[in-house]
């Protein structure tokens, strides 16, 4: 009955040190990958070298894409090509309607929408040829079920449409901010969870000092993610997620 979260990557868009931020949520027989960053197969394989079972591209049943920035979805083509052409096992893609609307047309189709034979014949493909696609409810208050998980979402403050999520299973709740500016209402929503991962970074992101000023009870349930390479992961003000961490709720 436990809800388990494994930390696949913790880095930001520019990291030269980590994998990009990515989480693997597991409950019963359901396994949900939250975002699909570049070098996905290697990031998943490295989970095995960090004390947990090895995860391969075939072990991902469900993928949720929080938004269309490349550090959050740049590994999706790898996953979908593998599943269609190598092992022929479909997975299910989840995202809010605004993300799904651009996923194929603005990010994936350039390398995926046609197969050309040696004789020049062209065979068109769509996203539905690669995966089962399930839009999350346009109304964030509506629950989105993925196997043993119940999800809800909330828009964040970012340059493009982005969804923070909360995942529930067996009475346990986990939250993830995805990319966002500092947003007290989002923090209140995430803070209802038993544990939540929150981004921190420069620019349009959430400054660390704003999070460090929150009540100790909130900080105790927060794990920092999507931090810059120079972030001090040993600073105890708020615990930092580390690649290979497994949180069970
Ligand atoms: Zn982003």
Image: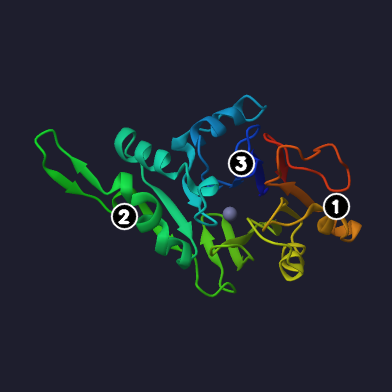
Q: Is mark 1 within 8 Å of ligand 1?
A: no
> What residue appears at the point 77 percent right and 40 percent down from the top-left corner?
231
10 Å crowding of disc 1: few (<14), some (14-19), many (20+)? some
- Colour basis: rainbow
Residue at x-position 32% and y-position 39%: 88
Residue 109 location (% of width, % of height): 32, 51
Residue picked out by circle 3: 14
Residue 128: image tag: 2
**In front: label 1 or label 3:** 3
Do callouts 1 and 3 mark residues in contact (Cβ within 8 Å)?
no
Q: Residues within 10 Å of mark 2 (few under 14, many from 20)?
A: few
Q: Residue at x 46, y 67 (%)?
A: 97
* 204 left or right, relative to 86: right
Q: Residue furthest left?
A: 119
> Quick check: 158 left or right of 194?
left
187, 129: nearer the viewer: 187
The image quadrant where one finds ligand 1 is bottom right
Q: CA distance from mark 1 to mark 2?
A: 42 Å
Q: Position of residue 122 (x, y in %)?
A: 15, 45
Label 2, secondary structure: give it: helix
The residue that disc 1 covers is 220
Please indicate, yes or no, whether residue 30 appears anywhere in the rendered image.
no
State the residue lying farthest toward the front.
203
Q: Nearer the N terminus, badge 1 or badge 3?
A: 3
Query: Would the CB of label 3 be found within 8 Å of ligand 1?
Result: no
């Amino acid at each position: 009955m436990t809800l388990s979260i494994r930390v696949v990557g913790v880095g930001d868009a520019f990291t030269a040190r980590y994998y990009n931020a990515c989480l693997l949520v597991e409950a019963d027989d359901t396994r949900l990958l939250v975002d699909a960053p570049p070098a996905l197969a290697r990031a998943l394989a490295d989970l095995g070298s960090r004390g947990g079972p090895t995860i391969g591209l075939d072990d991902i049943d469900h993928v949720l894409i929080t938004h269309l920035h490349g550090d959050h979805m740049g590994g999706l083509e790898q996953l979908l090509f593998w599943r269609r052409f190598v092992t022929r096992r479909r997975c299910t893609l989840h995202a809010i309607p605004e993300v799904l609307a651009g996923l194929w047309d603005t990010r994936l189709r350039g390398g995926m929408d046609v197969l050309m034979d040696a004789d020049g014949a062209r065979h068109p493909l769509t996203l539905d040829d690669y995966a089962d696609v399930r839009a999350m409810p346009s109304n964030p208050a509506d629950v989105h079920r993925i196997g043993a998980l119940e999800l809800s979402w909330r828009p964040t403050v970012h340059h493009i449409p982005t969804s923070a999520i909360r995942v529930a299973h067996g009475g346990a709740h986990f939250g993830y901010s995805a990319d966002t500016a500092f947003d007290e209402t989002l923090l209140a929503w995430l803070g209802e969870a038993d544990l939540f991962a929150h981004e921190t970074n420069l620019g349009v992101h959430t400054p660390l000092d704003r999070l460090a000023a929150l009540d100790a009870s909130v900080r105790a349930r927060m794990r920092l993610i999507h931090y810059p390479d120079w972030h001090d992961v040993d600073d105890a003000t708020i615990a930092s997620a580390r690649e290979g961490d497994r949180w069970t709720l």
